[in-house]
Image (cartoon, rainbow, N blue to C red):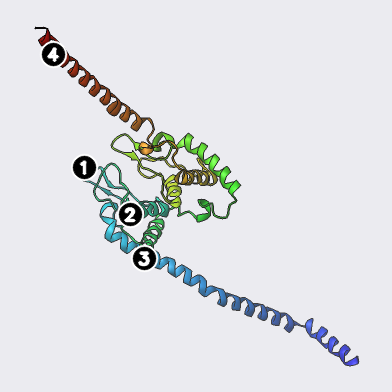
Amino acid sequence: MRLLNRSAGRLSRHRRGPIAGLLVLVCGLLLTGGMYAAFAPAQADSNQSQEELVKEGRELFLVGCAFCHGQNGEGVLTQGGSQYGPALTDVGSAAVDFQVGTGRMPMAQPGAQAPRKEVVYTKDEIAALSAYVGSLGTGPQIPDAELYSTDGMSQKDVDELVSRGGQIFLANCTACHNFEGSGGAMPRGGFAPKIRGVDSKHIYEAMLTGPQSMDTFSDGNIPPEDKKAVIAYLNELNDAPSYSGFTLGSLGPVSEGIIAWVGGLGILVGFAVWIAAHTTRSSKKKDEAAA
């Protein structure tokens, strides 16, 4: 017991000495340095991989995009002063992921609007191009899956989301995309494309970036949760069966009016001609018999 008391007394005296504070400081520095050495390499690798992705994206950009958009994404003007290829300095990675991911870019030929076609680049190349263009400015970034996916939600929550999304869609989107998302014609050679069966991420990016003739619905106009609701509504339309027989492209009164005028009136005119022709023949036979 005396030995323990003596040892405790010695430790207490040394703890109050000037060397004890220095030892504590050295131990703290060693612990901090060890933790930094453990975590710093992973962070350096992450930054390096992002830099490599941007570098790869620039190489792809110079080969496939610079002719129209400039070597640094500054855009290209024609000799007449019109815009040949728009600037990409502030469009963000979301715009590139949408345009290239749906095959709209690169364009096959200049026109009023780029139609959707087969995708040219791979997913890794699209990611590299998006990273490079995203590094040119402060535009919208590619959204996370949780912003547009309903995975993990209960069926009740999904149904409520679909109901709210339908109201938002009818108020903001049907004027161009039709009440069932089947698209429609627009002025100056443009058109609102069909958005049934489109990937949820691309629908979110389209609302966020406003490609071509489409208005930009920023998070201030339509919050992210409302964008998710619209996407849930469109996905519900994809799975909903048609109860009206021939859908006629789901274009509403446009296709129905064409069928009514061309088909219905055409049949009536044909019957009128047939009746008139047979009535004339019967009258001639009666006249010949009477003579």
Upstream in sequence: badge 3 or badge 1: 3
Q: CA distance from mark 4 to mark 3?
A: 91 Å
Q: CA distance from mark 2 to mark 1?
A: 20 Å
Upstream in sequence: badge 2 or badge 1: 2
User: Would you name the residue on which mark 1 appears?
Assistant: 80
Q: Residues within 10 Å of mark 4 (few under 14, many from 20)?
A: few
Which amino acid is tagged 2?
Answer: Gly
Between residue 135 and residue 243, name the one nearer to us. 243
Which amino acid is tagged 4?
Answer: Lys
Upstream in sequence: badge 1 or badge 4: 1
Q: CA distance from mark 3 to mark 1?
A: 33 Å
Find residue 68 and report its horizontal and vertical position in percent. 27, 52
The residue mark sitting in front, 3 or 1, is 3
User: Would you name the residue on which mark 2 appears?
Assistant: 73
Upstream in sequence: badge 3 or badge 2: 3
**Count of number-bearing discs:** 4
The residue mark sitting in front, 4 or 2, is 4
The residue mark sitting in front, 1 or 4, is 4
Upstream in sequence: badge 4 or badge 3: 3
Residue at figure coordinates x 44%, y 70% from the top left: 48
Between residue 241 and residue 83, name the one nearer to us. 241
